[in-house]
Amino acid sequence: MTHAPSLPDDPLAPLVPPEDQRQAARMAHDAFARLFRLSVEGKPAALAAGVAELEIGCREWCSAAGSEEARALRQALLASGIDQWALAYSQAFELTQLPGPSALLGALRAGLDVVADARFQQQFESVEREEMHAIDFKVELRRAIHLALWHAMAACDDRAEAARIMRGLGGMMLALIERMPLVGWRLVADALAHVQIRLLSQNAPLPQETTQRLFESLRLSLPAQRHREILAAAGQAVLAWQQARRPN
């Protein structure tokens, strides 16, 4: 059996440690979930109040960092996370606009002076461009996005709607593997392992069927060796989960 090579260190970890990176991903998730709900409800006053409250919370968390660079990186992570959630949902559910996330991103950026904005932009571009930059943030974020879309797919009663979400999720996974050649396939394997674990606890036929189609679409779209590596990594994670649940 071949083993995946070890990953290089994250050069941004000294600025924002792994646990803080994971916290940024969770904060972005929570902010998006709240703003998505408020956007769907269509109540402008409630949405504006939600944006204002979240802006304060995000700014306070960023301000707690120990340096200007760390504060800029924290804000870049929050912005990147919210933006990726909005993009994923727009693609999966064919949405044309999400006013809540856009308003929060604009508010966070508008409060920066010229120097702080340049510092933020530099950190944001670094995270987007360099695969290993803020890797713990990326792992936490992509896992949450993939599983949220899978849960949305699994909750569908309509086969066509479930298939549409499945196609969106599969496309995101393939794009991630292409954009992040070193880590992307590992993130997909992580998501597939969590999906398999969820399926072990339910017997609903439509989620089983649609998930099987997701696996099949990945098999057909990926090089055979890469597909085998993903399945092997996912299988090992599921096996470890099963072994951990066995009584001693």
Image (spheres, rainbow, N blue to C red):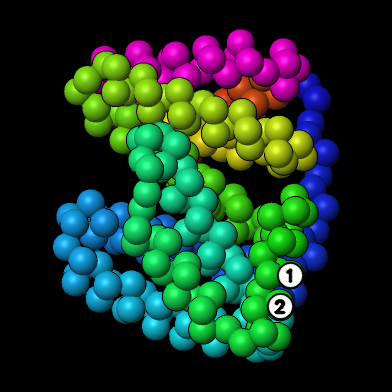
Q: Which residue occupies the foreground of this view, 152 or 37?
A: 37
Residue drawn at x 47%, y 19% is 214
Give the label on residue 194, or none: none
Write down the quadrant of residue 11 in the picture: bottom right
The quarter in which the C terminus is drawn is: top left
Name the amino acid, label 2. Answer: Arg
Residue drawn at x 79%, y 48% is 7
Total labels drawn? 2
Secondary structure under the numbered disc 1 in the rendered image: helix
Residue 15: give x, y in percent of width and height.
Answer: 71, 76
- Whether residue 220 is in magenta: the answer is yes
As drawn, 34 above or below 4: below
What residue did someone put label 1 on? 122
What residue did someone put label 2 on? 119
The quarter in which the N terminus is drawn is: top right
Q: Is residue 127 left or right of residue 33?
A: right
Q: Which residues are drawn in magenta?
A: 199-226
Residue drawn at x 35%, y 13% is 209
Residue 164: give x, y in percent of width and height.
Answer: 37, 23
**C-alpha distance separating marks 2 and 1:** 5 Å
Q: Is residue 135 left or right of residue 85?
A: right
Q: Which residue occupies the foreground of this view, 75 or 16?
A: 75
Q: Is residue 239 left or right of residue 38?
A: right
As drawn, 117 above or below 244: below
User: Taken as a whole, is the magenta stretch helix, strand or loop?
Assistant: helix
**Residue 132 visible within the image:** no
Q: Are marks 2 and 1 in contact (CB under 8 Å)?
A: yes
Name the amino acid, label 1. Answer: Gln
Q: Residues within 10 Å of mark 2 (few under 14, many from 20)?
A: some
Write down the quadrant of residue 37 in the picture: bottom left
- Whether residue 237 is in magenta: the answer is no
